[in-house]
Amino acid sequence: MNSKVIFIVAFLAVVSGIYGVVDILFLTTEKVDVPAQVAAVKEERYVTFWRAKQSLIKGESLVVSMVQREQVLLSEALALGIKQDVTLDFQPSTLMNTQVNAGELVFVEYQTGKEQAGYLDLLIIDGMTLYPLTISSKNLISGYIKPGDSIDILAISSPNMNLSNTTNELEIFAGVTASLLLEKVRVMSVNKNDSDIINPRMSSDGNSELTIVIEVKPDDLGRLALAQRTMYLEIVRSQTYLQPPYADVSDIIPNYNGVVELRGQDNSSFEGMLK
């Protein structure tokens, strides 16, 4: 009887020992597998970048339809030289600063914002230059002319007086004409503090002037500089004309011919001046 008891006790001890060994091995396996699982999860992180669907031109803004969004594993992105998500700027005012061919990757470094250095150079077409033009804003419609629009510049001139000052009033109408100075000129900005809409600045005496920045050919700089200091200038959105716009006083004042008639004593004086 005692031998049976001893056998049972010994059997239970062996079973308990085996269970303990198995339990220890199981816990060890769990501790080893957990870090491996965590590492595998970290390796599954994806990175987002963009690829050009068409050729992207230097100086143009980027539109979503021009690029294709792609996502790959971090390991694949690193092979392309990408360590993190690429976030592009699709604002119309942000411009491409380099040429990108179709199928190439597009990075944020390829874009220049309006506050960054070199932005103005991207705005100007090769062979053109910028010119600040001060004009009268009396006949402008708020919001009608914006950056990017093409305008025609009209000039009113007189051989007898300087019309560049908007406060001048014509007293002598002889020789006063209105003509087209420049056409299809691109507007780059309107006012310094408001680049989106025209908001004329009124002076204390009720006169209004507006400064716009336009893009012109270098050969036109002399004409513009002289016109701004001698003529009254206005701008309109570019139009298609049957013939170049031109008018003189006789077109608006019936029976006006601009000739001064000399009679009697005045005529004698005039003949004396000719001798």
Image: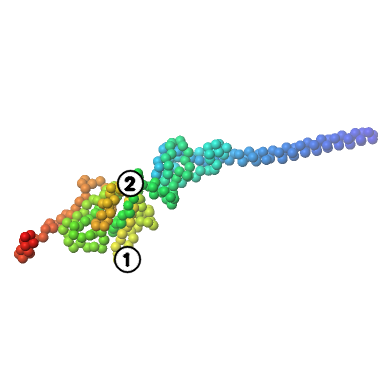
From the viewer's side, name the closer residue of 34 and 119: 119
User: Which residue is at the far right?
Assistant: 1
**Which quadrant is the N terminus positioned in?**
top right
Callout 2 secondary element: loop
Q: Amino acid at mark 2?
A: Met
* Residue holding disc 2: 128
Distance from disc 1 to disc 2, alpha carbons, whole Å, reads: 36 Å
In the rendered structure, the answer to whether residue 220 lies left or right of residue 43 reads: left
Image location of residue 115, percent across then percent down: 43, 52
* Residue holding disc 1: 204
Image location of residue 44, percent across then percent down: 59, 39
Instruction: Give the residue at x 46% y 37%.
Output: 104
Q: Nearer the viewer, mark 1 or mark 2?
A: 2
Q: Amino acid at mark 1?
A: Ser
Instruction: Give the residue at x 64% y 40%.
Output: 39
In the rendered structure, the answer to whether residue 148 lies left or right of residue 28 reads: left
From the viewer's side, name the closer residue of 37 and 58: 58
